């Protein structure tokens, strides 16, 4: 087997060592060399038939002086070499102290103060058969936990493990957060990294290579000590999810410089297990603003919250309706049998459709969601440990977004109940932060109150961030702050704890002014919608319109009414007189919501702030002819789950450039 000698191990533990030749004795044809090395002020000597062997023995002597051995283990002494051809290439002649092909033996039974990455099954030799075998499989198995973050930087470590690693800057004209693109080639495999500088892009490429080939992660989750296990999504898979969303956004917005400007980008990706080849982008969105109070709608025809994460989730709702429509069409004999829905019809006496086994939904956001997950200093020096002040009043508080602006404030700073006439008179219209809404999704599900009468709760499998991932704060914000207080959830509702990850090519802080629009793209829909964040209505040909978005409450109310009218096994087939009354038709959902709000109150985190009740008292409106045509086109273009293609159809931007 390939082996690592004592010199290599000593050099990992003690840097900048210098080996000196003390003497050379014996005949010319069989010399005996004496080498020395000084470690911590003490000189250690080694003898051998070559300088290399003498260095190995000197390093072995040095290692014996300070390594703490376990279970009586000892370092095998160097045996005298008799009649050895010191020009031989046999690696065993180098008296290595442990084989690279048996990594567990080092940290568990030999000594404890060598970094775990030294036991990686990859040789520093270019021709390592072990490395080649692993490279053939490319990705580390999803169930294998990553190794602890090493002390060395990713570029230095990659060069030590793979001497043939070659970096190349292939692009210098990207966006601000990814201006440079660097590719590293290792054993004929290419890994890409992006960043605002060449150095950061190079580091990102090295991290991607180490994660894929050596299962070494530089994620902040590797330093997290907040007591949670199995919260990290495999790094290579997380990178694949994030990259898929970014590439899809660049694809659908290509050539549209005006509306491709964004500060926050979010997307939902659907996969079959951890198979990256099955990954499909379901929805994309950008945006950072909320509707202005003067543009509130009594008909449910405006988008209230245009933050990217919220719009991406609403795009997922559209996908759910499309998949349920496949069951309706099949029941009516109008669909191709090759089109497969992600939902399975109920067979156990219940009326709820279930998600097929193995289907996962992943949320990508290029930064931490606003609210509690983002209320920290990215430079705070707490070693990612548990919050030293867990009772600090600012931690975990429910927070609201500020009307027509950025940032959040604690709900305890607000005026309490919001009223329609109060907002119209100038009271700020407040919306719960994205951190709080994600926390809500982790209890009530992504499907919302309407679809709760049709499908079982659907939860996020993971959240991948492009920047600003602080494990302790993120975990607390999305589920941790209520895990000890929430109780009494009616089945099948539960507290979901999604896996977390940070992309290796992290985005830098974007100081540009956020645009006042939001875009959304949905799988199976030909156009990208552009919404004015302040009015909640569509923008067409760079002009504000009074047209309603496909993601508005009214649009979904129409789709819900159409689905339950035709869907087999539906709990009821007619909607109630108003949107608000229809939402109240699922007692289990309402009970789960009640327990969620009670958990926040029990932890003294504030009370969930609701919109004026008039916003949900609208009735179903008949669609206009142009809206009916668009709905029919979208239904015809519904995408089956078994497509498997990650480059699903995209079309022009709604309204032109």
Image (cartoon, rainbow, N blue to C red):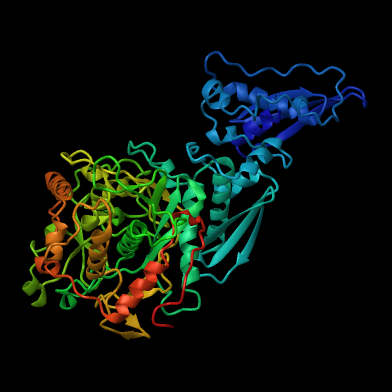
- The answer to whether one can see residue 426 in this image is no
Q: Report the residue at 39% width, 38% height from top.
A: 230
The answer to whether 103 appears left or right of 440 in the picture is: right
Left or right of 546 on screen, residue 235 = right
Q: Position of residue 21 (x, y in %)?
A: 77, 31
Query: For this rendering, which residue is in front, 122 or 200?
Result: 122
x and y percentages locating residue 650 in the rendered image: 47, 70
Q: Quadrant of the N terminus?
A: top right
Rendering coords of residue 8 (x, y %): 66, 34
Identified at 74% across, 33% down, the residue is 20
- Which residue, as the protein is rendered here, is positioned at the far front? 333
Horizontal side of residue 372 vs 214, given as left or right? left
Q: Position of residue 265 (x, y in %)?
A: 39, 65
Which of 517/488 is in front? 488
Location of residue 583 with respect to 71 vertically, above or below: below
Most extreme residue toward the top is: 72
- Residue placed most toward the observer, 282 or 41: 282
Residue 620 is at least partly visible in this image? yes
- Number of marks in picture: 0
Above or below residue 133? Residue 317 is below
Q: Is residue 436 above or below residue 549?
A: above
Q: Is residue 505 above or below residue 261?
A: above
Q: In the image shown, does 12 or 636 lie closer to the viewer? A: 636
Q: Residue at x 58, y 16 (%)?
A: 73
Res 135 quadrant in image: top right
Residue at position x 56%, y 72% in the image: 173
Question: Which corner quadrant holds the C terminus?
Answer: bottom left
């Amino acid at each position: 087997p390939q082996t690592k000698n004592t010199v290599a191990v000593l050099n990992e533990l003690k840097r900048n060592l210098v080996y000196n030749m003390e003497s050379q004795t014996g005949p010319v044809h069989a010399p005996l060399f004496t080498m020395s090395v000084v470690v911590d002020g003490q000189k250690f000597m080694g003898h051998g038939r070559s300088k290399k062997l003498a260095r190995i023995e000197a390093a072995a002597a040095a290692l014996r002086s300070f390594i703490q051995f376990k279970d009586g283990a000892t370092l095998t002494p160097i045996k005298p070499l008799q009649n050895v051809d010191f020009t031989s290439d046999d690696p065993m002649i180098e008296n290595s102290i442990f084989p690279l092909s048996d990594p567990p033996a080092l940290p568990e039974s030999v000594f404890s103060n060598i970094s775990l990455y030294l036991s990686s099954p990859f040789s520093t030799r270019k021709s390592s058969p072990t490395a080649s075998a692993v490279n053939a499989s490319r990705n580390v198995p999803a169930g294998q936990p990553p190794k602890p973050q090493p002390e060395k930087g990713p570029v230095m470590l990659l060069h030590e493990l793979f001497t043939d690693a070659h970096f190349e800057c292939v692009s210098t004209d990207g966006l601000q957060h990814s201006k440079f693109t660097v590719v590293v080639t290792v054993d004929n495999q290419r890994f890409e990294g992006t960043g605002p500088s060449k150095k950061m892009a190079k580091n990102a490429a090295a991290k991607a290579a180490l994660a894929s080939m050596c299962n070494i992660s530089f994620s902040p989750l590797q330093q997290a000590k907040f007591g949670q296990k199995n919260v990290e999504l495999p790094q290579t898979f997380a990178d694949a999810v994030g990259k898929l969303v970014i590439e899809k956004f660049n694809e659908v917005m290509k050539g549209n410089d005006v509306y491709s400007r964004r500060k926050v980008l979010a997307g939902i990706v659907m996969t079959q297990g951890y198979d990256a080849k099955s990954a499909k982008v379901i929805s994309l969105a950008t945006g950072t603003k909320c509707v202005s109070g003067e543009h509130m709608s009594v008909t449910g025809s405006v988008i209230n919250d245009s933050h990217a994460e919220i719009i991406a989730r609403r795009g997922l709702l559209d996908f759910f309706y499309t998949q349920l429509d496949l069951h309706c069409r099949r029941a009516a004999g109008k669909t191709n049998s090759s089109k497969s829905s992600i939902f399975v019809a109920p067979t156990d006496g219940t009326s709820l459709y279930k998600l097929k086994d193995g289907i996962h939904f992943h949320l990508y956001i290029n930064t931490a969601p606003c609210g509690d997950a983002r209320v920290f200093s990215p430079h705070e020096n707490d070693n990612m440990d548990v919050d030293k002040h867990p009772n600090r009043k600012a931690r975990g508080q429910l927070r609201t977004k500020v009307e027509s602006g950025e940032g959040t404030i604690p709900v305890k700073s607000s005026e309490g109940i919001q009223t329609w006439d109060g907002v119209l008179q100038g009271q700020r219209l407040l919306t719960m932060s994205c951190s709080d809404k994600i926390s809500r999704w982790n209890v009530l599900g992504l499907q919302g109150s309407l679809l709760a009468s049709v499908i079982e709760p659907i939860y996020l499998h993971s959240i991948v961030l492009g920047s600003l991932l602080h494990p302790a704060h993120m975990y607390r914000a999305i589920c941790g702050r209520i895990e000890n207080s929430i109780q009494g959830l009616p089945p099948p509702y539960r507290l979901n704890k999604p896996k977390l990850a940070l992309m290796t090519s992290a985005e830098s802080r974007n100081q540009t002014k956020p645009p006042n629009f939001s875009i959304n793209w949905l799988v199976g829909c030909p156009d990208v919608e552009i919404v004015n964040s302040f009015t909640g209505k569509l923008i067409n040909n760079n002009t504000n319109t009074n047209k309603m978005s496909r993601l508005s409450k009214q649009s979904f109310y129409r789709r819900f009414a159409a689905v339950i009218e035709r869907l087999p096994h539906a709990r009821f087939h007619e909607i109630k007189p108003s949107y608000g009354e229809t939402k109240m038709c699922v007692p289990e959902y309402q009970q789960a919501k009640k327990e969620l709000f009670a958990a926040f109150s029990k932890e003294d985190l504030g009370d969930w702030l609701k919109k004026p009740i008039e916003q949900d008292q609208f009735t179903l409106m008949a669609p206009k002819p142009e809206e009916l045509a668009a709905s029919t086109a979208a239904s015809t273009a519904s995408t089956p789950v078994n497509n498997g293609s990650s480059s699903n159809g995209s079309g022009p931007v709604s309204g032109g450039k």
